[in-house]
Amino acid sequence: MRKSLKLQVALVFQVLSGHFKLMQNINEIEDLIKLISKLPGLGPKSAKRIVLKLINSKDELVKPLANNLAQVYKNVTRCNSCGSLKSNLNGCNNCENIKEKFDKICVVEDIADQWSIENSNIFKGYFHILGGTISSLSQRKEDLLVNSLVERVRKEKIEEVILATSATVEGQTTAYYIQDSLKNCKVKITKLAQGLPVGGEIENLDDGTLFSAFKNRSKLNSNSD
Ligand SMILES: [Zn+2]
C-alpha cells in the first residue's frame, strides 16, 4: 500500500515536471513565469504552479484576470496629493472622498504600513504615503510628496503630524527631512516612540508594539506652543 502511494506520488511529480518542461518551451508561458516569479513571496517554482493553474482555467481565470489587469493599469494611479492608490474614475478614497474631518495626519512609507496601523485601530486621522524613503535609490525626493504634505497640513488645518517612518537610518533621515520641511507650519510634529525595534519596519510590527509606539510618540518640534 505504502509502496503504491510512493509510486503514485513519484508519478505525479514526473507528470508535473514533464508539464513544467513542456510549459517552458513556449515563449509566452516562459515570459509569464518570469513575470510572476517577480511577485513578492513567489519564486520560479510557485510561479510555474500558478501558470499551470492559469492554463488549466483559461476561461475562469486568464480571461477575467487579463481584463482586470488592463483595468487596473488604465484606471488605478498614485494620488498626487496623499500618495495612496486611487481610481481615476472615483477619486481618492484616502483624501478626496473622506467625509470625516481630522486634525491629525500620519506619515508612512508604504500603503502596507497604513494598513497595519488601520487594522490595529490605534489611530484615527488622515494618512500620507511617501512611497519610500529619502535614501531609497529609486526614490526621487519630489516623489515623496512632501510639498503636498505641507499643503495638506495647511489646508486641512492639521494640528499634529505623526511621523511613522521605520526605525531604520533611511526612515529616520526621511523623518528629519519632513520635520525640516514643516518648520514654517504651526503644527505639532511627533514621531513614534522607540518601542520600535531598531531596523524595524512598520509593516512587520505586531499590534502591541505599534500601540505602545503610538501611545509614547515623542514631540519633535515646538511650533505649536
Ligand atoms: Zn489621495
Image (spheres, helix red, strand yellow):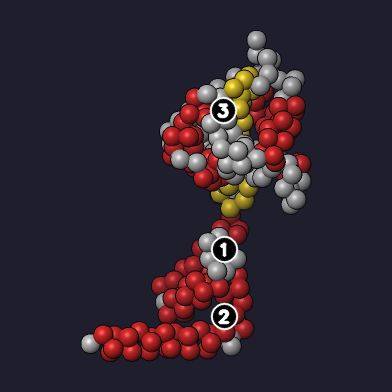
Decide which of 73, 53 is in the foreground and name it: 53
Task: Kindly identify which numbered label has been placed on residue 39.
Answer: 1
Q: Residue 211: x percent and y percent?
A: 46, 31
Q: Identify the residue position indicated by label 3 in the image.
A: 193
Q: Residue 86: x percent and y percent?
A: 57, 46
Quarter of the figure that contains the C terminus: top right
Horizontal side, residue 51 vs residue 88: left or right:
left
Q: Nearer the viewer, mark 3 or mark 1?
A: 3
Q: Is mark 3 within 8 Å of ligand 1?
A: no
Q: First in sequence: mark 3 or mark 1? A: 1
Q: First in sequence: mark 2 or mark 3? A: 2
Circles 3 and 1: CB atoms closer than 8 Å: no
Identify the residue at horizontal 60%, vertical 38% (top origin): 198
Task: Kindly identify which numbered label has been placed on residue 98.
Answer: none
Q: Which residue in the rendered view is the most extreme toward the front? A: 3
Q: Residue 185: x percent and y percent?
A: 71, 20
Instruction: Look at label 1 and name its amino acid.
Output: Leu
Q: First in sequence: mark 1 or mark 2? A: 2
Q: Identify the residue position indicated by label 2 in the image.
A: 29
